[in-house]
Every structure is written in C-alpha cells, then in structure tokens.
Amino acid sequence: MNSPATRLVFMGTPEFAVPSLEILIRNRYPVPAVVTAPDRPRGRGQEFSPTPVKKLAVEAGIPVLQPEQLDDPGLVARLKEIAPDMIVVVAFRILPREIYTIPRLAAFNLHASLLPKYRGAAPINWAIINGENETGVTTFLLEDKVDTGGIVLQRSIPIGPDDNAGTIHDKLAMLGAQAVLETVRKIEEGGMDISRQDNSLASRAPKIFKDDCRIRWNQPAERIHNFVRGLSPYPAAFTEHREKILKIYRTRVVDAPGSRMPGEVEIDGEEVTVAASEGGLCLIELQQEGRRRMTAAEFLRGYPIRSGEKLI
C-alpha cells in the first residue's frame, strides 16, 4: 500500500485530540511537525509534564513545536519552511491569519458541536447543560472569526439520558477522528462541498469557570440534573453544606421531597434527596471537600447531614 503524499502539520493539545492524530499516523500520512502547548506543571507534585498530543508525537518520532505565543516569528518561519499541504487543528488555540494561510491546500479545525450551535471553548458541556438530545462534530475551514468558517462535514450522535460530559467527550473524540480523516481525503481529492454557516442559528459555548459551577436549587430539578451531567466529571457542579464544598457527579430526578423548600435535604435510609423549585434530585454520587468520590450511602455513613438542613 502506498503512503499518502499529503503532508500535514497537526495542532492540538488535550486527550480529545489524540485519536485524530492517531488515525492520521495509522493511515500513514506524513506529519513533519506537531504543534502543541508547552509542558506545564501538573498533578500534586507539580512536575512538568508533556501534553497528551506531545506524548503520542514523541512515541511516533514526530518533531514537536511548543511555542508560548502563536505569533512567534520563529514558529511562522518554521512552518513556512515545512510548507505543509494542510494544517489540521483539534482542540488548540486560535490561529492567526499568518499561520492558517501557510498550507498549500487548506487549514481546518475539528469542533465538538454541530456548528453554528455552541461556538466557543466548552461546546460539550453546554450542549448537555441545555438539555440537547443530539450533538456531534464539525470540520470547517479556518477564518479570522472564531468557529465561523465554511463547513466541510458534520457527523452527529444522540445524547442519551445517562450521558455526561465525560462520556460524550470520549464518543466525540472517536467520531471526530473519523471526521478528520474523511476531511483530509475530501480536501486531497478536491471534492469539498463547503456550506456557509447560518449566523442567525448560532449559539455560544463560553469557557466555564469555577463560579459558573455552583448549583442553584431554585431552578427546576430537570435543569439542575442536566447542569450536573454537563459538568461531570470535570469541572463538576458543586453546592455547600456547613461551609464545606460538596461536588455532585450523578443525580436522578424524583418527586419533590415533601414540603421542602429549594435546597432542603430529605434523608431516607441511604438516599439523599434535595428539593428544587420543581421536583427534587436524588444525589447518587458526590464528593465531600478533601475526600474521594463516593455513593450517597457511603457519604451518609461518614458525614453528618440531617433532613431539613439546606444546601446553598
């Protein structure tokens, strides 16, 4: 089998991007360089660690570029010297025009939503938080405005009732890898049928910060349930009890516990139910500040909480 001649520069950083690089390597595309984020201190020991994409690139013997700034003249010069046919971007930073115009054929990005819905840094989280029943991936050509370029292809999957941000992340990473390979082949063959995005249908998926993750119990239980799913397992929705943070990872929507006010707790055997503005939430998996994740039954055996107390 002959190797493809199209030379690709791959740009990506987190675990989500790894399957896309893997599939290109497996299909024997020449990748003269991978561009990824600099090594950062990670974990409890704060030791400098390579990104997941760098680990794979090193294992595959691919040269790695790790610029602090993408407008670094040295990076631009190096990419022009490499003269790739395509730049493939998966979960990376916003590229300046002087970089995405370098390749001979195209520069394209894989985005984890069905654009123009959920433009931004956290499309998986927001799709689930908003109660969507479907999501997917989009490959699109890069333009100056973020996530607005012409669409090459889209692939969709359902969001099941038990899915959370973690499960959808993993499904879309694999689906996205197939989309990347198919997009590369379409561009190679000159068979692209580019469709413009309808900006009137656009929605935003901004980056999520810690303060955005607090549960507001004065909302309907179904909405809070989706909020928990959309933030699980990371960064995790949280509430407070006796000035301690409780992270909530799994819930189930139930009937309202008696005449409880939003945020009030009802303990029944090994179950913890919290009242919402409509209905209630049974807490299935949670984590006390400074402790490991545990079931509600485990939590009750080691944590003092009583019916009628309030989570805020």
Image (cartoon, rainbow, N blue to C red):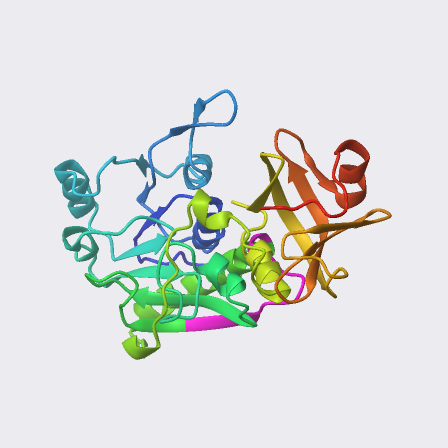
Q: Nearer the viewer, residue 55 or 167?
A: 167
Query: Where, by quadrant of the figure, is residue 217 drawn?
Result: bottom right
Question: How many numbered callouts?
Answer: 0
Tell me where residue 55 sits by quadrant: top left
Residue drawn where x is 74% and y is 66% of the image: 255
- Horizontal and vertical percent for residue 88? 33, 55
| Residue 124 locus on image (x, y percent) | 48, 59
Expressed as whole percent of the image width and height from the top left, the position of residue 202 reads 34, 72
Q: Residue at x 77, y 47 (%)?
A: 307
> Can residue 90 be spotted in the picture?
yes
The residue most toward the right is 269
Q: Which image quadrant for residue 292?
A: top right
Is 256 covered by the magenta stretch?
Answer: no
Magenta residues? 154-166
Residue 195 in sight here: no
Q: Up-down: is 203 above or below 282?
A: below
Q: Give the image location of residue 291, x and y in percent.
A: 66, 30
| Residue 253 falls left or right of residue 213 | right
